[in-house]
Amino acid sequence: NAGVTQTPKFQVLKTGQSMTLQCAQDMNHEYMSWYRQDPGMGLRLIHYSVGAGITDQGEVPNGYNVSRSTTEDFPLRLLSAAPSQTSVYFCASRGFGETQYFGPGTRLLVL
Amino acid sequence: KNQVEQSPQSLIILEGKNCTLQCNYTVSPFSNLRWYKQDTGRGPVSLTIMTFSENTKSNGRYTATLDADTKQSSLHITASQLSDSASYICVVSGSNTNAGKSTFGDGTTLTVKP
């Protein structure tokens, strides 16, 4: 199993640009989540999904969209990047009642 | 509002010493509590996961305890090593309608010095 994979590893954007952060898992997990982690801070939940076709907002959803068309993939879209979205983004997945597996993260810098 | 509070915020210990990290939560209804280790620049890695009926769970030198009545958990690290330097995060998941969400603590940053 590759586990949870994220692409890209690094990205630099200009204010106003849009982009999609990719996340995929090969463990057939129902639950997938996106978090952001600002320097020296804890993880904050952006959006999550409890299964294909089902998504919901977390703590900090503004400026981000998600979709879950398949069990494996859970992309995160930045609609119009802002400097406040500079952060490290982690995708995670888990089965029901199981531990959560995190991807390696995507480091995003918005200029 | 569901909350997870961890203490201390940071901790410095000498190599070979033991330490205990604390986690208090208000998540309800409760499903499970997990401890993660996050090395600098990496994603969190699971150490332990405990459900309502479990009081203690060990993973090598890491031992987690759970008191579901008082909604408290601790992570005890025995005979610390330099590689234990990391952030330790307590995560609590709710059950049923809350199943997809997990509430994260802000973490305890542990530094182990030689």
Image: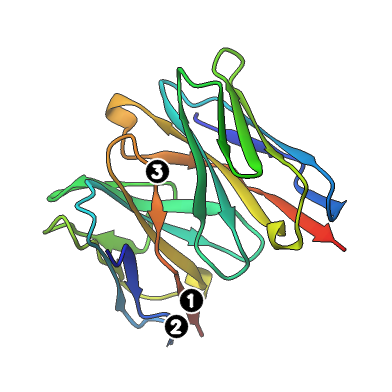
**Viewer-side label of 3, 2:** 3
- Of labels 1 and 3, earlier in sequence is 3
Which residue type carries mark 1?
A: Arg
| Element carrying mark 1 | strand
- Mark 3 to mark 2 CA distance (whole Å): 26 Å
**Residue located 64% across and 48% down the image:** B107
| Relative depth, front residue between B18 and B37 | B18
**Residue located 35% across and 39% down the image:** A98
Q: Is residue B106 above or below residue B55?
A: below
**Residue located 61% across and 33% down the image:** B64
The answer to whether marks 1 and 2 mark residues whose Cβ atoms lie closer than 8 Å is yes
The residue carrying mark 1 is: A107
The quadrant in which residue B42 appears is bottom right
**Residue located 42% across and 40% down the image:** B102
The residue carrying mark 3 is: A99
The residue carrying mark 2 is: A10
Which residue type carries mark 3?
A: Thr
- Of labels 1 and 2, earlier in sequence is 2
> Are tags 3 and 2 found on a single chain?
yes
Residue B37: give x, y in percent of width and height: 58, 53
Residue B72: give x, y in percent of width and height: 62, 24
- Of labels 3 and 2, earlier in sequence is 2
| Relative depth, front residue between A84 and B84 | B84
Circle 2 chain? A
Circle 1 chain? A
Disc count in the image?
Answer: 3
